[in-house]
Amino acid sequence: MEQISERSRELLYGTWRKQRGWSPINVVSADGVYFFDSSGKRYLDFSSQLVSTNLGHRNGAVIDAIVEQAKKLPYVSPAFTTEVKIRAAEALLKVVPKSIRKFFFSTSGAEANEAAVKLSRMVKSPAYKVLARYRSYHGSTYGAISLTGDYRRWLAEPHTMPGIVRYPEPYCFRCPLKLNYPQCGLACVNYVDYVIKQESNVAAVVVEPITGTNGVIVPPPEYLPTLRKITSENGVLFIADEVMTGWGRTGEWFAVNRWGVEPDILTTAKGASNTYVPLGVTGTSKEVADFFEDHLFAHGHTYEAHPLALATIPAVVAEFERMKLLDHVKRLESYIGKRLNELKESHRSVGDVRGVGFFWALELVKDSRNTPFSDYPQRAIGEPGEVDRLAAKLLEMGVYVYNGPSWLIIAPPLVATEEQLDEGIRAIDNALKYTDDKYSQ
Ligand code: PMP
């Protein structure tokens, strides 16, 4: 194990961190909700890796689909069509919101968003501005990191793409407008109408229906329907970034379904292939598709619509249906909520619990004024904060939890049983002593 870790340090980059001190765990196998390192230690995967292996590890049906496709036709240029492309698109049509009719396939969430922005700008030309939120993450390539609102964007500046305008998020725990829901009348989303009108030349508004890496921010019920209404009234495209929220994470195929919202463009990745092979999806409405009948579709990649990636989509959909996973997630949603709220009752460092389905955050605070443990600037210089240390403790205890500067993201594989959820929550209960000890009145 030492040797592989050491060679990794020499030969590879550890991303989003300083290289010094990097000593990654050597993972040798995985099964269901667990993965194992080379010493045989077992880890409960309480975040589905990067909120992405929704069906869990080593799903046989998805693996078989990849292997069969590899044997039959591992690659052909995008100039040709193949049966696997149609099977993937037809499987998608069964699960995406009704407004989404036509697809472009790439290899990551970032690329799916890059395509969404390019297509929006082509369709709405000469309008080119795109509205995105401060607390958002859309990927790390130059276009996608420019859309991103959080501190990771700062690291790419001043080289980010122009034409992005920010709007505030419905982060009610620390409202950016210092208001309280519902008396606020949803000022944060109504402000978008003002921004669009004042900016002019707006092509699209991009939104994570539930903010993901920036802390699982679930909007109030009227938020997304209002945003949809504002974009429609202003003739602006609505792009739903469902890279993290898609594929059953919220108990629906896609998070927008929870609010009956139909986007013009939907991007997704991660759960689409269960992350076993790289895949990004940009789904578009009929309006967008119609535009390209007589306009150049000026976009494409060598690896677009890759057969091995597309082969996973029908298998993933079939696995969801076979295991009735959406029902399973809906059934356990209130159980997870109850158990996590018990943690809030018994741990002073837990300031807020929020989430839906199998997608939750524990927001950690260091005092009774709800001060966050770590602020973005600290992360931006690559220094670990207390919540990073809390996550490291959990890892030592055999539970992997993905974390942000001041929150843990609890997003187990959707196949997790109630007992497995209890196993993870018990470990968090024990580990929270660490942040409780750092709490001051
Ligand atoms: N959008 C969202 C909402 C994401 O959570 C992520 C990844 N965490 C991305 C886009 C970027 O996806 P990728 O890492 O596959 O480029």
Image (cartoon, rainbow, N blue to C red):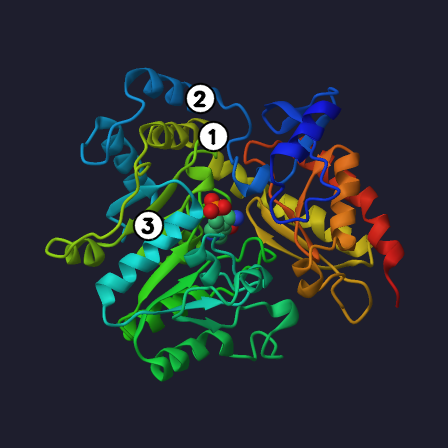
Tell me whether circle 1 and circle 2 mark residues in contact (CB < 8 Å): yes
Q: Which residue is mark 3?
A: 97
Q: Position of residue 62 (x, y in %)?
A: 43, 24
Ligand 1 has an atom within 8 Å of the beta carbon of the residue at disc 1: no
Farthest residue to the bottom: give it.
198
- How many angstroms separate mark 3 from mark 1 (CA)? 24 Å
- Residue identifier under label 2: 63
Q: Can the viewer see residue 1 in this picture?
A: no
Q: CA distance from mark 1 to mark 2?
A: 8 Å
Q: Secondary structure at mark 3?
A: loop
Q: Earlier in the sequence, mark 3 or mark 2?
A: 2
Q: Quadrant of the N terminus?
A: top right
How many labels were placed on the picture?
3
| Foreground disc of the pair 3, 2 | 2
How far, Cα to Cα, is label 3 from label 2?
27 Å
Name the residue furthest left: 294
Query: The disc labelled 3 sits on which kind of residue?
Result: Pro
Mark 1 or mark 3, which is nearer the start of the sequence?
3
Counting from the top left corner in percent of width and height, residue 71 is at: 33, 15
Q: Indicate whether 334 appears above or below 319.
A: below
Position of residue 181 measured from the top left corner of the image (x, y, whole percent): 58, 74
Place residue 347 in its image quadrant. Answer: bottom right
| Label 2 Cα crowd, 10 Å radius (few <14 / some 14-19 / many 20+) | some
**Vertical position of residue 9 compared to residue 346: above or below:** above
Q: Amino acid under label 2? A: Ile
> Left or right: 154 with respect to 104?
right
51, above or below 1, in the image: below
